[in-house]
Amino acid sequence: MCVALAALDATIRVQGRNGERRIPMADFHRLPGDTPEIDTNLKPGELILSIDLPPSPYAGHSSYLKIRDRASYEFALVSVAAALELDGETIRSARIALGGVAHKPWRVEAAERVLIGKKATPGLFQAAGREAITGARPYRENGFKVEMVRRGVARALAQAAGVA
Amino acid sequence: MRGTSIVAIGDPLVRADGRAKVTGTAKYSAEFPVRDLASASLVMSTISSGRVSATDTTAAERAPGVLAVITPANAIRLPGTERRLALLQDDQVFYQNQPIAMVVAETLEAAQHGASLVIPRYEPRPAKLDFLAGFASSYPSTHNGEPGDQSWGDVDAGLAAASVTIDEVYTTPIQHHNPMEPHATIAQWDGDHVLVYDATQHITGLQEKTAKVFAVPKENVWSHVMLAALAAKQVKRPVKLVLERPQMFGPVGARPRTHQHVTLGAADDGKLTAIRHQVHTNTSLIEDYLESAAFPTRVMYSCPNISTQSRLVQLNLGTPTYMRAPGVATGTFAIEVAMDELAYALKMDPLELRLRNYAEVDPHSGQPFTEKHLRECYQRAAARFGWSNRKHEPRSTREGVELIGWGMATETYPGKNLPASALVRFQPNGRILVASGTQEIGTGNYTVLTEVAAAVLRVPAASIDARLGDTNLPPAPISAGSMSTASITPAVKTAAENARRMLIALAVADQASPLHQARLEDVAFEDGRVSLKADASKGEEFAAILKRNGNRPVEAMASAEPKLDTQKTPCHSFGAVFAEVAVDADLGMTRVRRVVAVYDVGKLVNHLTARSQFIGGIVWGISLALQEDTHVD
């Protein structure tokens, strides 16, 4: 859910002692840094009031892919939220967010940029998958996820475009 | 109306303990109320090999609520200890997550907090954790007294004569079973009598072991987990010890890793000319446990030249143990995948290859099996599955992004039973008790005891109470090896027949009974009444007879011994399993879409519980193949 919300530019509306504020979904969760015990940027005493989704040009062409060992009762090994704004077969803009690869939903904007202004083809989606893993830093036991992301991004984009 | 509820052997009687379990009222080992109960918490080693040179217990001993911090320095000496049990009798560490100290406190929280304050100092030794490197020093072993190595014929000659050979290595990882009920023990001493509540597969075996370790008379012990008993003895209070989930990885066993080298030789027509199955598997440094993966190969297929070999590799891990189904799950995986590879090398249907090598008699002894209906299993399962529509070519069936594969395999399991005893008691309150010192580990023993007693006595199941899980009851074997039902039910049958005979004898001897001085053979026990066979109106409820005769129960205990010498008459279950699996060709996601299995396991005492066990076996098989893999770091 958070992965899809990150892809679709959701904002979290929270109420604290000092009033209301909005946190963009992409900024809601934190990387561990020196305070791994703090998962989110919610302050003490703050309550989530709503999660707001803006009207989206992506509503017609989106896909959420959950790659997991079992069909149910299982977290995703890798999840991909992909959304396209299409003008005919041409991609005007794109959103790609990943789950299961970092401590927070992970937007891959470089991969999104690969798509802009191009024709939606399987070959282009493969290129976006390759771009999505550029700079990935796996650990000993999760190296398989890099290749899984590459293929998953290509699949999710193809599904979003309706060419899978 | 009453007659309609008579039970026949095999009826799908619902679980006698089902309601209690699903409503949460069934009592588990950790839930028995015991006055003045203290809690224990274990401290586990964080190294795999070496010794604990010193343990700083100062902070733990000062922590609120702590009654005792038990380490090898102060643990009471146990007369019959065994190193493999890790009972805090010495400072040696043989695996990571080995108990090295124990804190006993007023509450669970205080015990856990105390355990967190214990500071062990280690002198590590290099740990043996490289499985493959250990092959050079591997050694033969046995499994439950059966040899790890067994060969006949001439495998080399058989391979030389083969037109096609398969030579492959198959591996299976370490896998842990983690039941929902944690390992839990409550121990309570009274002099040299110890009462133990425990979650166990074998209450009588644990009673014997506890008696040995603590050198107390067996009849003064109920059953075990030794550390809880040690803690209770040391603090002189009842103690509860429940393993925490992370503590399940090491001290309570796992399915060990296997490395299986399978070589098959076959003629052009598919007839096997040789089978060689060489297994390497790990054990610990403190005890030999052999995963009997090579054993099923001895009964699977007709072949004149078979060699099976087992080698143990010692690793600094907790001792492996029997995990469903020990040896068979791992071993049939290897031999059956090899058979599939052979089928492809021969361009032959995998089922046809198995039929051409069908073992009409036991391949080793040449003796006929007690019964074998595997051929019918294959035929029925294949028909239900639609196997005749299978395409032989790999990657030939696709649905969207998924490749669809069909496969099948043979199953086998030894058919064994052990001596067991049971009692049946007619009670003055009109109810009938059936009891045996067996245990309920989810397999349905309450139900099976009830069903057999009800069927033999021709009374409704609702009039029977089943009791088990207590070593004061007539002893019964371990719930393992698919033996319980076959072992216990003959004893229940004889006990019920004997109790009925005693009841009838009591009735005809009773001057106030309408059956007084009737001939024994003219009297029947039907639907809770003792009556004349010729005139059912002449008789009475059994409770009436008991009430007039001192209000005492009538009870009979019976034992049953295995009738069959399985060394001379091979007895095995067989089965055929067919599966359809979808694999996402790009993403690797694997989904088992359907499984059809047909089993030949002898007479079913309860079709419903048996079906549950078959389904459970299939689920475990899927999980073994696709899901589970314990990583050692």
Image (cartoon, rainbow, N blue to C red):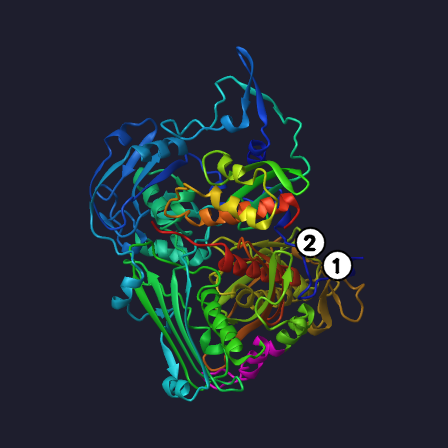
Check disc 1 and report its element: helix, strand or loop. helix
Kindly identify which residue carries mark 1: B5
Residue B170 falls in which quadrant of the image? bottom left
Check disc 2 and report its element: helix, strand or loop. helix
> Is B100 rendered above or below residue B105?
below
Specify whether B333 is left or right of B145. Answer: right
Residue stretch rendered in magenta on the structure: B350-375
Specify whether A104 is left or right of B372. Answer: left
Instruction: Identify which residue, B185 or B364, lies in the foreground.
Output: B364
Quick check: is B364 in the magenta stretch? yes
Residue drawn at x 41%, y 64% as measured from the top left: B171
Q: Position of residue B11 (x, y in %)?
A: 69, 63
Q: Residue furthest top?
A: A18
Quick check: is B408 in the magenta stretch? no
Residue type for callout 2? Ala
Specify whether B485 is left or right of B129. Answer: right
| Same subunit: marks 1 and 2 | yes
Specify whether B322 is left or right of B415. Answer: left
Kindly identify which residue carries mark 2: B462
Mark 1 nearby-residue class (10 Å; few <14, some 14–19, many ≥20)? some
Measure the C-alpha gap from mark 1 to mark 2.
Answer: 9 Å
